[in-house]
Image (cartoon, grey):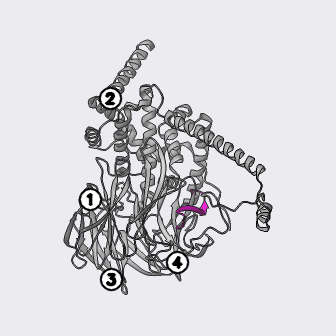
């Protein structure tokens, strides 16, 4: 093992690279688009703090001072009550008994019960007291009786790349100022551990897997696919990642990794299928560039760019629905028209049908022809709909926005449960108005990654958990 | 000559300040002037940090929409430029965070050498390309400080004002970012 010495950089090379990246200036039409967007946006009024001549940041200082005063008052009240109780005890001591004596001896012991905290690295993390039953099962103790239960999980930083499930825990990749994968305990809805920590120069991505396994793509000097043991947080299996795994998209479907073409490659669009038991590439499928893949029974499906479509294209008619034969990997293309290509608006399969989110509606697509067989109108979805399927239901998150395509101006008001048989909206779960980055299903819950910021200040990212009633 | 130049410069500053004042009071046309004057620069910063046109375009739109919305709350209008740069940096940071692991990157359209495609590919993956890919491995904070210093040519004091951190911290972060870029480039060149 020989370590490489870092390459020496000159100021000129950095400047040249950045000039190359920066391009020549704003593209045509951008200024006009901004002006239109500004015309549609209402200005905020100056706050009462501003009117008083105080800075906006003073609000937080005022809250801090008020909080400290409140704490002081509470402490004073506790001290007062405590001193009265002490006085009472001195007046009337309890009769001695063996049990009281034991408590009295034990009470002053300076060994507190270990408590979990987000930054702690417990050797034995507080696991939920249930048994894992797979992704579609429930690991938490009791699902809600009839109404979905919404919980907001605080995450310790704000650069997240998706949610995975394994070992009765939810795992969230974080590549902010150093990499790591946070483990969210299902029982307490808190981050109890961070595994696979490392420098940001070697980022890591927890892959979405449809099995109860945590697979990560470790982009160190040698790019590897590693399976993480949820109990120890360490790799227990490792295979070389095939070319294209850096940015081409990777999906763990069954016991296989499906790897899309590398974004820089100018060669053919190639998907490689890797057997995760042996690390061997078992299929090389030419002329397919998927942007989303999923499995429905034994069939693997993809939303993929049409033949000849530019890899950078985001046009509405650039996608095909692609079906892979589970044995021969033969490809069947079904042309789609006018669907959103933003990857946050993924497809979903339920009860043998395929659904796609589009602005203002959910489209049911024939898995035989690719044609739209039903349109389900969805309000407040001018930017589209994020979709996810559970065992028997379709869940939709309408994205409402104004002039920009993502960010703080986008909000989602509610989560909708759709009956795939009728297309009826069966239930509406109100959510805090946040900008969702991801919607996934695992362990009987829907999980939504949502940052909370306004571009002037980032308050952090939250993971919203919606626990579904049994059969939801 | 110098007094004249100063007078002209002072006039431009006064005009700009007037535009900011008017925009803060809800004058859309004044804000349009600010957009026209600044969108190229804002786009270059966003494009350099984010690395592709589509994300940069979104980020710049968000910057100006946020700036318009929040402008009445800006107390010191002389600090508009630093404030706008801070919004730009935050929007780029959010843009990086919003990226999925499956990225859509708008590749520059370049003519391929038909006679020798390998040669063209080799050139495409040349030093600048490798350095750019290494840059993609850095987090938002490191990208930002390198862009402000090397692309925008901003002084340490100016960066400190934009990012609201101490000048000493800027120097330290700059050195860290450069070292990280060097390490990332080393990793980029490693055999896989």
What residue did someone put label 3 on? A330
- Distance Cα–Cα, label 2 vs label 1: 35 Å
**Quarter of the image that includes the C terminus of chain B:** bottom right
Picture layout, residue B180 above or below residue A448: above
Residue A339 percent across, percent down from the top left: 25, 63
User: In the depicted view, which residue is nearer to us: A323 or A443?
Assistant: A443
Tell whether label 3 touches label 1 (CB within 8 Å). no
In front: label 3 or label 4: 4
Q: Earlier in the sequence, mark 1 or mark 3?
A: 1
| 3D distance between C-alphas at marks 3 and 4 | 35 Å
Choose between A470 and B187: the one closer to the eye: A470
Front residue of B8/A460: it is A460
- In reply to whether residue A198 is colored magenta, the answer given is yes
Task: Return the residue at label 4.
Answer: A132
User: Are the numbered discs 2 and 1 placed on the same chain, yes or no?
Assistant: no
The alpha-carbon separation of the residues under discs 2 and 3 comes to 59 Å
- Which residue is tagged 2? B23
Q: Image quadrant of residue B5?
A: top left
**Parent chain of label 1:** A
Label 4 environment density (alpha carbons within 10 Å; few <14, some 14–19, many ≥20) = some
Give the magenta range.
A186-202
**Residue at 39%, 39% in the rendered image:** B42
Query: Label 4 lies in what chain?
Result: A
Share a chain, discs 2 and 4?
Answer: no
Disc 1: which residue = A315
């Amino acid at each position: 093992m020989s370590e490489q010495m870092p390459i020496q950089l000159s100021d000129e090379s950095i400047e040249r690279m950045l000039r190359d990246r920066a391009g020549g200036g704003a593209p045509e039409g951008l200024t006009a688009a901004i002006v239109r967007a500004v015309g549609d946006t209402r200005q905020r009024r100056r706050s009462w703090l501003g009117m008083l001549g105080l800075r906006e940041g003073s609000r937080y200082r005022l809250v801090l001072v008020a909080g400290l005063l409140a704490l002081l008052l509470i402490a004073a009240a506790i001290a007062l009550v405590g001193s009265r109780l002490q006085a009472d005890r001195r007046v009337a001591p309890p009769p001695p008994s063996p049990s009281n004596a034991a408590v009295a001896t034990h009470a002053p012991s300076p060994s507190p019960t270990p408590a979990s905290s987000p930054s702690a690295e417990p050797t034995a993390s507080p696991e939920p007291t249930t048994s894992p039953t797979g992704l579609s099962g429930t690991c938490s103790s009791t699902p809600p009786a009839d109404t979905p239960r919404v919980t907001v999980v605080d995450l310790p930083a704000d650069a997240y790349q998706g949610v995975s499930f394994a070992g009765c825990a939810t795992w969230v990749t974080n590549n902010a100022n150093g990499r790591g994968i946070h483990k969210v305990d299902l029982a307490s809805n808190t981050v109890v551990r961070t595994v696979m920590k490392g420098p940001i120069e070697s980022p890591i991505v927890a892959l979405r897997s449809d099995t109860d396994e945590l697979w990560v793509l470790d982009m160190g000097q040698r790019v590897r696919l590693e399976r993480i043991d949820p109990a120890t947080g360490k790799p227990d299996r490792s295979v070389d990642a095939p070319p294209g795994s850096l940015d081409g998209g990777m999906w763990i479907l069954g016991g296989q990794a499906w790897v899309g073409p590398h974004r820089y490659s100018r060669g053919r669009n190639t998907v490689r299928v890797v057997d995760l038991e042996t690390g061997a590439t078992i299929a090389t499928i030419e002329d397919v560039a998927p942007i989303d893949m999923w499995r429905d029974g034994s069939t693997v499906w993809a939303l993929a760019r049409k033949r000849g479509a530019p890899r950078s294209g985001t046009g509405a008619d650039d996608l095909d629905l692609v079906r892979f034969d589970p044995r021969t990997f033969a490809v069947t293309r079904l042309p789609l028209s006018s669907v959103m290509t933003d990857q946050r608006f993924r497809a979903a399969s339920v009860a043998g049908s395929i659904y796609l989110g589009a602005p203002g509606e959910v489209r049911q697509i024939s898995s035989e022809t690719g044609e739209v067989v039903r349109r389900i109108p969805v309000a407040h979805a001018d930017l589209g709909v994020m979709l996810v399927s559970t065992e028997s239901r379709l869940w939709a998150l309408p994205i409402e926005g104004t002039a920009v395509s993502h960010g703080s101006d986008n909000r989602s008001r509610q989560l909708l449960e759709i009956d795939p048989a009728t297309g009826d909206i069966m239930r509406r779960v109100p959510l805090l108005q946040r900008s969702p980055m991801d919607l996934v299903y695992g362990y009987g819950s829907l999980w939504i990654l949502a940052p909370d910021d306004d571009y002037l200040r980032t308050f952090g990212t939250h993971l919203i958990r919606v626990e579904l009633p049994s059969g939801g | 000559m110098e007094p004249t130049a100063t007078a002209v410069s002072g006039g431009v500053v006064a005009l700009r300040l007037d535009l900011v004042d008017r925009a803060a009071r809800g004058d859309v046309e004044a804000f349009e002037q600010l957009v026209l004057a600044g969108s190229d620069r804002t786009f270059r910063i966003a494009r350099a940090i984010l690395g592709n046109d589509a994300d940069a375009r979104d980020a710049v739109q968000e910057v100006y929409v946020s700036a318009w919305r929040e402008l009445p709350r800006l107390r010191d209008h002389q600090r508009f430029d630093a404030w706008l740069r801070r919004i730009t940096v935050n929007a780029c940071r959010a843009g990086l965070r919003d990226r999925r692991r499956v990225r859509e990157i708008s590749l520059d359209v370049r003519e391929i050498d038909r006679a020798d495609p390998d040669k063209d590919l080799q050139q495409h993956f040349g030093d600048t390309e490798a350095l750019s890919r290494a840059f993609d491995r850095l987090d938002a904070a490191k990208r930002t400080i390198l862009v402000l210093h090397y692309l925008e040519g901003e002084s340490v004091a100016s960066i400190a004002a934009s990012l609201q951190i101490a000048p000493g911290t800027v120097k330290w972060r700059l050195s860290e970012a450069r070292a990280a870029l060097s390490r990332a480039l080393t990793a980029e060149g490693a055999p896989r």
